[in-house]
């Protein structure tokens, strides 16, 4: 059967990665979480003191880009690929609220974006891929056979992210998480380079009131249609 590219874009904490993982597993496709790549670059900037609460030395980060190597390694126990930054597994470190608070500023830098977009395009060259992010259907794979755009209210998304962080023992307040979600929405949709917009040919799914199974079923039908029209 022919393979397609499935692009899943949308706001933060809309459950893009949960859906993308389910679909990739079902189809035997590769899943790529592009947000993890931007998070790893943000972590690198934090570790090297290029970014902090009231400073960001963009030049230093841009000059360091050639020394930032990102790759994914599939973890069969977890069932997904973990993010490595310069050969170190950073999967846990990139998921903190601290990284979330710096990542949108890092993702707004054009030099960072072009480096990561190039790598993402290479990963999808053979198709059979589900990639999630903010610009997959618009910039990375404008010709993807299926584009999904996910939305949900900010409160619903903040509650989901809060529950995830709590479960991991990250002691944050719901208000902090909501503030971060709202701030990231703003930066992601207002940046000059590749802002988060819905592609003309994307299917929008508001999952505020859909559970995982319902959402999966809706998308699987779209996937089958896209594969059958190849
Ligand atoms: O999906 P996420 O929350 O892990 O993404 C982290 C940040 O990275 C998000 O605030 C926006 C940015 N991002 C992006 O600009 N482009 C992508 N393709 C993926 C993520």
Image (cartoon, rainbow, N blue to C red):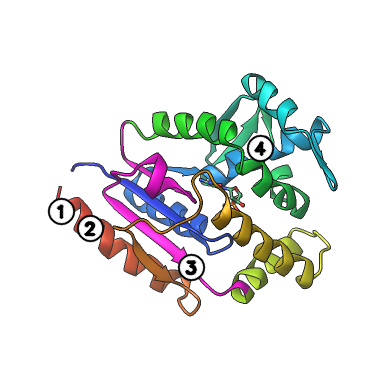
Q: Secondary structure at mark 2?
A: helix
Residue that badge 1 annotates: 228
Q: Is mark 1 within 8 Å of ligand 1?
A: no
* Mark 3, residue position: 151
Along the viewing direction, whichever of 166 and 99 lies nearer the viewer: 99
Of the numbered discs 4 and 1, the one sitting upstream in the chain is 4
Outermost top residue: 66
Q: Which residue is mark 4?
A: 40
| Dot 4 alpha-carbon crowd within 10 angstroms: few under 14, some 14 to 19, many 20 or more | many
**Taking the image as drawn, is residue 52 in sight?**
yes
Query: Which contiguous range is marked in magenta?
Result: 126-154
Instruction: Please report whichever mark, 3 or 2, sits nearer to the chain's N-terminal start.
Output: 3
| Beta carbon at label 3 within 8 Å of ligand 1 | no
Task: Measure the alpha-carbon separation of dots 2 and 1.
Answer: 6 Å
Tell me residue 61's x, y (percent). 71, 29
Residue 215: horizontal and vertical position, in percent? 40, 69
Q: CA distance from mark 3 to mark 4?
A: 24 Å
Q: Circle 4 sits in a helix, a strand or a loop, which is it?
A: helix
Label at residue 224: 2
Say which element carries label 1. Answer: helix
Decide if ligand 1 comes within 8 Å of the CB at mark 2: no
Question: Do the CB atoms of the residues marked 3 and 1 lie less than 8 Å apart?
Answer: no
Q: Let me know if residue 86 is in the magenta part.
A: no
Mark 2 Cα within 10 Å, few/some/many (few <14, many 20+)? few
């Amino acid at each position: 059967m022919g393979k397609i590219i499935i692009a899943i874009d949308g706001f933060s904490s809309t459950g893009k990665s949960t859906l993308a993982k389910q679909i990739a597993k079902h189809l035997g496709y590769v899943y790529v979480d592009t947000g993890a790549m931007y998070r790893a670059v943000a972590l690198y900037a934090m570790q090297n003191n290029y970014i902090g609460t009231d400073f960001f030395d963009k030049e230093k980060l841009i000059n360091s880009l050639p020394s930032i190597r990102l790759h994914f390694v599939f973890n069969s126990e977890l069932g997904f690929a973990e993010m490595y930054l310069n050969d170190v597994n950073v999967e846990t470190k990139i998921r903190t609220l601290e990284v979330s608070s710096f990542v949108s500023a890092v993702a707004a830098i054009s030099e960072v974006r072009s480096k990561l977009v190039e790598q993402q395009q290479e990963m999808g060259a053979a198709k059979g891929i589900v990639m999630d992010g903010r610009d997959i259907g618009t910039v990375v794979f404008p010709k993807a056979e299926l584009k999904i755009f996910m939305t949900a209210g900010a409160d619903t998304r903040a509650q989901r992210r809060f529950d995830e962080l709590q479960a991991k023992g990250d002691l944050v307040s719901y208000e902090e998480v909501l503030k971060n979600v709202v701030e990231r929405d703003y930066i992601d949709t207002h940046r000059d380079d590749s802002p988060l917009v819905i592609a003309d040919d994307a299917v929008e799914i508001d999952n505020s009131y859909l559970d995982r199974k319902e959402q999966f079923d809706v998308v699987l039908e779209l996937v089958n249609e896209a594969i059958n029209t190849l």
